[in-house]
Image (cartoon, rainbow, N blue to C red):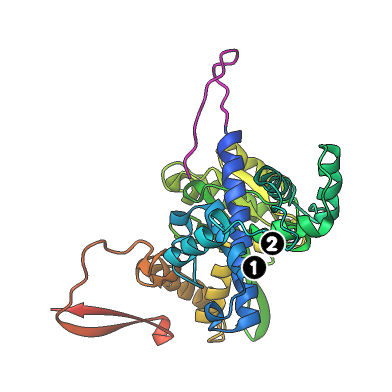
Amino acid sequence: MRFTLRASMTTPTSVTLRHITSKALERAKLTTAYALLERDVFRTHGSTAVRHLTDDERRQLARLEHDIGWRRLRRIAVIATIRTIRRWFRELISQPERAKSPGGENRTSTETELEIVRLATENGWGSDAWGAKRIVGEMLKLGVVIAKSTVSAVLRRHGVPPAPQRGRVQDGDHVIVHDPATTAAIDFAQVMILDQGRICQMSILIAIHLGTREIEIVHVAHDPDGRITVQCARNLTMEGVGFFKRLGIKTVIMDRDPIFTQDFRHLLAEAGSEPHRIAPRCPWENGYAERFIRSLKENLLRKCLFTSESALRLALAEFQIYFNHERPHQGIDNRTVLGNSDVPQSMGKVVRIPRVGGLINHYERVA
């Protein structure tokens, strides 16, 4: 994400980011809408959905593709190629045949149609998205008398979904866009271990950089409290070596767990890493950290019973090396997070390098 800085004439040091942020927010909303629409289409028609789409569904997909940008969605469009969706837009929306009604009168004027589409798209946020009746009333205020069925037909023809669908994908007022290059997320994972004959729960504080997916096992403790998290904040923001300082982190996403105390958040803010607390009961807003914790549990924590805290720490240290340097990451085109950028060898013997006693394996070619 690029940020544009503009100095005000009256306040030379002021920074204006509103325009860029609003554009990024709009792109995020539209991308979410497109992903949900594709999901619904696949649920309705199955894996061969592209062969069974109705014209209305093609219009909706083409409208969203056009609004987001063909190139931007090239990476996420699944149901059809960009060329096919552009053809749908051309044939069904931008250059449709101007058919006449059975009575011989021309269809609704182009100006009126564009105004209807504008009202629907500019007021599609949240559960109060404008439906056909609401648009009829607004058009009446503008001196245009039009029927509800005509408004519905115009929206359908232009690929604009009904109001419940438009509102559904944008419901909620906690949508915030962050720059992945300067954003990290933190969270706690829990695991049960057997220590000196008794079972106890250990808490693992992890941090992940959204841009590169690099992770850091910050701390491991039994029943951590505010004093421990404050010390973790100092370690993370230590000049030159701290995870946040080294990566230039400006925003830290976290949940509302009381263990992230006010002192903890204050230390982060003082060091230039502004804390962002997600909305209550919305773990998906901290999706990067939640997804890494899932990988940590599936790949390591659920595969064995640790018999001491030191064994857990050793396994976590090996897993961090594996995750950052050896594991191909699907989210970044199957590259390793901090791996070698050289072209891999295609000749030589393939050898297995076991991690954590063989629970995890890494493979390399040797000459």
Identify which amino acid the numbered label 1 is placed on. Answer: Asp
Magenta stretch, residue numbers: 1-16
Query: In the rendered view, does 240 fall on the left or right side of 149?
Result: left
Residue name at image x 57 percent, y 57 percent: 93
Give me the disc on residue 341: none
Query: In the rendered view, does 290 fall on the left or right side of 347?
Result: right
Q: Which residue is mark 2?
A: 156
Task: Indicate the quadrant where residue 222 lies.
Answer: bottom right
* Above or below, comparing residue 321 to residue 157 in the picture: below
Q: Residues within 10 Å of mark 1 (few under 14, many from 20)?
A: some
Q: Residues within 10 Å of mark 2 (few under 14, many from 20)?
A: some
* SS for callout 2: helix
Quadrant location of the C terminus in the rendered image: bottom left
- Mark 1 or mark 2: name the one nearer the start of the chain: 1
Closer to the camera, 273 or 63? Answer: 63
Q: Which residue is mark 1?
A: 56
Image x and y of residue 159, in percent: 64, 60
Image x and y of residue 344, in percent: 22, 71
Residue name at image x 56 percent, y 27 percent: 15
Image x and y of residue 168, in percent: 74, 62
* Above or below, comparing residue 164 to residue 41 in the picture: above
* Above or below, comparing residue 16 to residue 271 in the picture: above
Find out whether the residues at labels 1 and 2 contact each other: C-beta distance under 8 Å.
yes
Q: Main secondary structure of the magenta part?
A: loop
Magenta stretch contains residue 11: yes
Identify which amino acid the numbered label 2 is placed on. Answer: Arg
User: Can residue 308 be seen from the camera position used here?
Assistant: no
* SS for callout 1: helix
Residue name at image x 69 percent, y 63 percent: 283
Image x and y of residue 68, in percent: 54, 53
